[in-house]
């Protein structure tokens, strides 16, 4: 989720494409001259041949973006779990923007999220939030998710066509996370703007000073808004996640108001874009593989396996980032303290060392799949069960209620022009 090492789109574009740029090129490639280029013209349409080349030629590859790109399942798993890699968010941002800027609201706010913290701060934040996020609580959301999915379909069913992204996949994740956090309908646009600032920080695309100033002022408004809400929650505790977080306590330890706001905004950001895209990708993949869709219709009990396979085959988060906290070796490469690492989750999921049986095929009967799509180690996705449940209900309900649905141009959908988040921008369909 966190693309710490990706400095900017320009950073990639500056990279000479090199002899192996066209992943479809079958000529032998000199590994020492190979340059990974996710800005190659065909990359967004189909990144997987590029990942295959990386795994084969240079699995811990120093790319011109100034980061080691790690592509094999074993190495990605090691980086995610080995405590010698961390986030070092403040240090990394200070290097880039200066130590003064890092003390301003935007960076201060992001540094208080568990996603960008290292232990012991991370442990404390996660322990307090995880309490309000148990499997039982997620399962209790099933009827509400079903209702939101049904309402989205009721609104379009007589029309015979819709955009599956904005009119369908969007609704369950956004409505559920806003319900959970008590964010009212008319405030969602404002929170969305702050959420976009956060995504920018995660992607590490360079901010201009003007953008930082605008983002600082949005963060201040959000903090003011929530401070008023926390006072209300303390006086009149409700049944929502915000109240649970306000009240959450461990060893006499509570979240400060700033930590509360950072945690709530993180849940808002992480809880919607990722799942919208997983639902979109799952629908594309099923329609590209009609035999598998037919199998799922005949045996709906395969849905949990199918979700593992959606996650493995077309994950909505393609990579996450880490920083080396000390000098070390990874595979055969010497990594120095402070080096940036890109962990290619989506590449690890296609590694033949773990998936010897047709790793590039979509197969909902695949057993013991261990996709790394929710990360691993101490930052393993807190919302994994919620994302699974929403995808399950969205996909099964759509298959049942619109059995004749067809996606226009399913072989060539309009992918978002984004390397971190993979998913369709729009997905027109009819029935
Ligand atoms: C398909 C949907 C989702 C995907 C693919 C996804 C993916 C990820 C990944 C890869 C990470 C680890 C990042 C890292 O190691 O740097 C992560 C962390 C996280 N995710 Fe998700 N996520 C999804 C849905 C959700 C939802 C629905 C929520 C909450 C409502 C959520 C909340 C979080 C949080 C709070 C973290 C940070 C955990 C930590 O740092 O300890 N995610 N997610």
Image: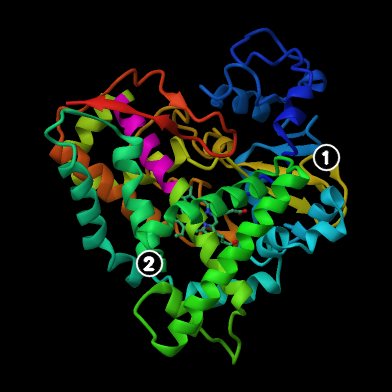
Task: Work out which residue is located at the far bottom of the displayed protein and give it.
Answer: 252
| Residue 401 in the figure: left or right of residue 307 | left
Q: Quadrant of the C terminus?
A: top left
- Distance from the alpha carbon under mark 1 to that under mark 2: 45 Å
Return the residue nearer the eye: 38 or 214: 214
Residue 304, can we see it?
A: no
Above or below residue 366? Residue 115 is: below
Return the residue nearer the eye: 151 or 47: 151
Return the residue nearer the eye: 22 or 227: 227
Q: Marks 1 and 2: which is nearer the front? A: 2
Residue 124 image point, x, y percent: 63, 77
From the image, tell me which residue sits under label 2. Answer: 180
Residue 372, can we see it?
A: yes
Above or below residue 128? Residue 22 is: above
Task: Work out which residue is located at the far left of the displayed protein and give it.
Answer: 158
Q: Is mark 2 within 8 Å of ligand 1?
A: yes
Q: Are marks 1 and 2 in contact (CB under 8 Å)?
A: no
Magenta stretch encompasses residue 359: no
Residue visible at 65% across and 30% down in the picture: 55
Above or below residue 313? Residue 328 is: below
From the image, tell me which residue sits under label 1. Answer: 333
Q: Which residues are magenta?
A: 274-287
Return the residue nearer the eye: 404 or 135: 404
Above or below residue 109? Residue 34 is: above
| Residue 350 in the figure: left or right of residue 161 | right
Residue visible at 35% across and 64% down in the picture: 179
């Amino acid at each position: 989720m966190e693309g710490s090492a990706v400095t900017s789109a320009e950073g990639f574009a500056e990279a000479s494409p090199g002899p192996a740029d066209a992943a479809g090129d079958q000529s032998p490639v000199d590994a020492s001259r190979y340059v990974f280029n996710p800005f190659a013209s065909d990359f967004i349409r189909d990144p997987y041949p590029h990942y295959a080349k990386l795994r084969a030629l240079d699995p811990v590859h120093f790319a011109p973006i100034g980061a080691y790109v790690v592509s094999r399942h074993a190495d990605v798993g090691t980086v995610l779990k080995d405590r010698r890699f961390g986030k070092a968010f403040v240090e990394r941002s200070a290097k880039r923007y200066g130590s003064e800027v890092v003390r301003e609201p935007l960076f201060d706010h992001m540094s208080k999220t568990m996603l960008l913290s290292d232990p012991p701060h991370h442990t404390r934040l996660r322990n307090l939030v995880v309490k309000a996020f148990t499997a039982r609580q997620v399962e209790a959301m099933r009827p509400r998710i079903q209702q939101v999915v049904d309402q989205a379909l009721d609104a379009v069913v007589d029309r015979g066509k819709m955009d599956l992204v904005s009119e369908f996949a969007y609704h369950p994740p956004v409505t559920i996370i806003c319900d959970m956090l008590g964010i009212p309908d008319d405030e969602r646009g404002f929170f969305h703007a702050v959420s976009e600032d956060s995504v920018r920080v995660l992607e590490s695309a360079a901010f201009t000073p003007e953008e930082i100033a605008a983002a600082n002022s949005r963060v201040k408004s959000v903090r003011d808004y929530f401070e008023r809400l926390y006072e209300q929650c303390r006086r009149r505790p409700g049944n929502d996640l915000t109240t649970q977080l306000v009240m959450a306590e461990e060893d006499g330890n509570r979240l400060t108001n700033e930590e509360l706001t950072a945690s709530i905004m993180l849940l808002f950001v992480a809880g919607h874009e990722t799942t919208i895209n997983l639902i979109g990708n799952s629908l594309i993949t099923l329609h590209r593989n009609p035999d598998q869709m037919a199998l799922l219709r005949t045996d709906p009990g395969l849905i949990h396996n199918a979700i593992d396979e959606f996650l493995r085959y077309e994950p909505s988060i393609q990579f996450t980032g880490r920083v080396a906290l000390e000098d070390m070796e990874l595979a055969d490469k010497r990594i120095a303290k402070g080096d940036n690492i890109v962990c290619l989750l989506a590449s690890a999921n296609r590694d033949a060392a773990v998936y010897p049986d047709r790793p590039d095929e979509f197969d909902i009967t695949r057993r013991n799949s261990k996709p790394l799509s929710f990360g691993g180690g101490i930052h393993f996705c807190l919302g994994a069960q919620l994302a699974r449940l929403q995808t399950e209900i969205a996909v099964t309900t759509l298959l049942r209620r619109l059995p004749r649905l067809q996606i226009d141009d399913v072989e060539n959908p309009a992918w978002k022009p984004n390397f971190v988040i993979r998913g369709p921008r729009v997905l027109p369909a009819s029935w």
